[in-house]
Image (tube, coloured by chain):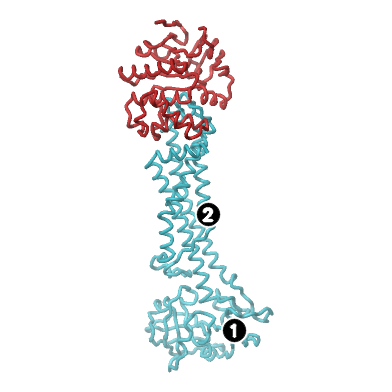
């Protein structure tokens, strides 16, 4: 109690020096919480968007399908299993037929993935209903990345070319009926969505699909021959790995911020050894034990961290709440990185993040305060009283 | 010397390592101090005054010999027991005042009492009494930087006296003060010595202090060359 009382007096008495350190520490708290909040928010949004736009609640893949090997696409489609029919009719699972193709916007050639999907599906958030229209051309939808790279816009008519199951090349005209905005590049970049019936006709593989995307209410426990079940988690592994890597990268910033805090406190405490030698000698002369002096300086350092929580709360809580509401706008071009990333990320601050950060900074501050304080305890009191630098 | 003996020094030597050799600061000191003395070590710089004062104050230990302060053998005290002795029985006054710069006058004087776990009202009364002795009750909220040198030393005296120590050790208490302030300080200490029977031991080479001493112990090269009792 004595150490706390004296440390409080010393901190309050030190005035500006204390408040500068406290401000630096509070800034560290807020930056760490905000930065991790942004990454967690990104993670949360990315998972939510990927679930809504790409992976659903899991998928079934035709056994030959390998999304990283386009040459497998010719062999990776098969008849729609009967067990899926009921789910398809109820809108709980939707088939997708995938094939390679080329698009010729403004006379240029650009390869793409053609993806046939039921315009009436409700499993994914894709605006496939836009393709429910009677047109001379085949109605297609594309994402804004695809539209940007092909210089296509809504209402544009362009030519696509593909090879059917018999190896015959064919071409037709398609009309872009919708350019959708989506944060998931895997359903956007280099892709064109067309009605699955047309796709099956074009490919000459009626009633076939490459993958099935599962919706919320689809229950299937049995194994289906020729089809592999992919859980939602396994489909998001890549994203999770990226987030994990981002967190590792972020921990460098974390480290720098912690070092900044350590430096502030360590500097203060080390300076104290020299600046406050007389004071320390006086404490000892008045009957404080060395342990009490060490405790006093350690508590002083730790108290910086506690005061920083209070100061940080004063300006940090409004800032963090404001960020939750307005979000953090990602720099231009971030969505071209191929990651599922929203233009604006809304940070998510968990109690665990806040408590861990506070405890971590408190512990580090206490440790770096203790180290110079231990040196103080070894000072010769007679020299300390005179303020002799040792 | 008919008073109770509270401090005895027998064959006290103190060596300090210097380079490859050693410097002998005290070379066989034999002394005794009774209760309520107003004594001082007098001598030029390097004669061993401060070293002797530090050993009596348990801030340092003798290299040889025996020092008994209020029945505590200084050479054999643990750091904790030495701290307890200083906390309860000894008061210090330094040449450079050594006030805690971030504390007010009240807080500086109160500090030794915080180490006693005395209650708040008891502390307040003791601090105000001590400040009254030194005539600084109107400055309780001031910080050391706002005080003159004389006022700072008076605060230091109040801080040393607030716990009613048995012995006060004053190292060159007037070295940084002008003549008028020096006399004021010394009169204050003399009065406290009379009123409270506190033993005062000085280390000084200041004539202003020497005039007030009731016992002058002359030190030269770490040895006592004279020990005079002054009778008015």
CA gap, disc 1 and disc 2: 51 Å
Q: Residue furthest right?
A: A222
Q: Secondary structure at mark 2?
A: helix
Q: Give the image location of residue B159, x and y in percent.
A: 43, 26
**Number of marks present in the image shown:** 2
**Chain for mark 2?**
A
Q: Tell me the cyan chain.
A: A
Q: Which residue is mark 1?
A: A77
Tell me, for residue A355, which label it has, or none. 2
Q: Does B25 sit above or below residue A93?
A: above
**Chain for mark 1?**
A
Q: Secondary structure at mark 1?
A: loop
Q: Is residue A347 left or right of residue A218?
A: left
- Is residue B17 visible from the viewing direction of this image? no
Q: Residue at x 56, y 70 (%)?
A: A236
The residue lying toward the viewer, choosing from A210 and B160, is: B160
- Label 1 or label 2, whichever lies nearer to me, is 2
Q: Mark 1 or 2 closer to N-term?
A: 1
Q: Tell me the red chain.
A: B
Question: In the rendered image, which quarter is residue B96 located in?
Answer: top left
Q: Does B116 sit above or below residue A113?
A: above
Q: Give the image location of residue B84, x and y in percent.
A: 55, 26
Question: In the rendered image, which quarter is residue A220 located in?
Answer: bottom right
The residue lying toward the viewer, choosing from B120 and A278, is: B120
């Amino acid at each position: 109690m004595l150490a706390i009382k004296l440390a409080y007096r010393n901190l309050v008495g030190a005035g500006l020096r204390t408040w500068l350190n406290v401000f630096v520490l509070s800034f560290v708290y807020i930056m760490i919480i905000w930065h991790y909040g942004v990454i967690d928010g990104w993670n949360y949004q990315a998972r939510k968007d990927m679930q809504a736009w790409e992976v659903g609640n899991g998928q079934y893949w035709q056994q030959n399908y390998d999304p990283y090997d386009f040459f497998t696409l010719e062999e990776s489609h098969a008849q729609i299993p009967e067990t899926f029919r009921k789910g398809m009719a109820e809108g709980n699972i939707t088939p997708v037929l995938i094939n390679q193709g080329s698009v010729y916007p403004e006379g240029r050639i650009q390869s793409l993935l053609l993806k046939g999907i039921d315009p009436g599906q409700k499993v994914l958030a894709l605006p496939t209903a836009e393709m429910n229209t009677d047109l001379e051309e085949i109605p297609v939808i594309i994402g804004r990345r695809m539209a940007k790279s092909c210089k296509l816009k809504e209402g544009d008519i362009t030519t696509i070319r593909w090879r059917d199951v018999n190896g015959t090349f064919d071409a037709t005209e398609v009309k872009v009926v919708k350019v959708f905005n989506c944060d998931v590049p895997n359903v956007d970049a280099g892709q064109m969505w067309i009605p699955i019936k047309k796709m099956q006709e074009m490919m000459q593989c009626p009633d076939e699909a490459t993958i099935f995307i599962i919706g919320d209410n689809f229950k299937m426990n049995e194994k289906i021959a020729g089809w592999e079940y992919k859980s939602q988690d396994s489909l998001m592994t890549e994203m999770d790995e990226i987030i994990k890597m981002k967190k590792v990268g972020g921990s460098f910033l974390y480290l720098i911020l912690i070092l900044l805090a350590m430096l502030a406190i360590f500097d203060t405490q080390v300076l104290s050894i020299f600046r406050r030698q007389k004071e320390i000698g006086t404490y000892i002369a008045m009957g404080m034990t060395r342990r009490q002096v060490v405790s006093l300086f350690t508590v002083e350092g730790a108290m910086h961290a506690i005061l920083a929580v209070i100061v940080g709360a004063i300006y940090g809580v409004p800032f963090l709440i404001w960020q939750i509401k307005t979000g953090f706008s990602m720099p231009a071009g971030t969505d071209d990185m191929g990651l599922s990333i929203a233009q604006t990320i809304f940070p998510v601050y968990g109690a665990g993040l806040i408590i861990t950060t506070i405890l971590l900074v408190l512990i580090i501050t206490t440790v770096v305060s203790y180290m110079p304080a231990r040196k103080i305890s070894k000072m010769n009191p007679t020299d300390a009283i005179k303020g002799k630098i040792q | 010397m008919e008073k109770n003996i509270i401090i005895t020094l027998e064959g006290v030597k103190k060596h300090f390592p210097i380079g490859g050799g050693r410097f002998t600061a005290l070379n066989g000191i034999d002394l005794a101090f009774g209760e309520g003395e107003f004594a001082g070590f007098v001598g030029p710089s390097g004669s061993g005054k401060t070293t002797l004062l530090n050993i009596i104050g348990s801030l340092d230990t003798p290299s040889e010999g025996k020092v008994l302060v209020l029945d505590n053998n200084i050479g054999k005290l643990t750091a904790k027991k030495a701290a307890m002795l200083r906390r309860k029985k000894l008061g210090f006054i330094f040449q450079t005042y050594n006030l805690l710069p971030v504390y007010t006058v009240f807080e500086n004087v109160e500090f030794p009492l915080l180490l006693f776990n005395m209650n708040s009202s008891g502390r307040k009364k003791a601090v105000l009494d001590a400040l009254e002795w030194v005539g600084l009750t109107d400055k309780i909220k001031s910080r050391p930087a706002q005080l003159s040198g004389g006022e700072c030393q008076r605060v230091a005296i109040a801080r040393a006296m607030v716990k009613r120590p048995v012995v006060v050790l004053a190292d060159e208490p007037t070295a940084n003060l002008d003549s008028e302030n020096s006399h004021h300080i010394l009169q204050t200490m003399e009065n406290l010595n009379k009123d409270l029977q506190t033993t005062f031991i000085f280390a000084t080479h200041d004539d202003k202090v020497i005039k007030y001493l009731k016992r002058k112990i002359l030190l030269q090269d770490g040895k006592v060359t004279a020990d005079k009792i002054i009778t008015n």
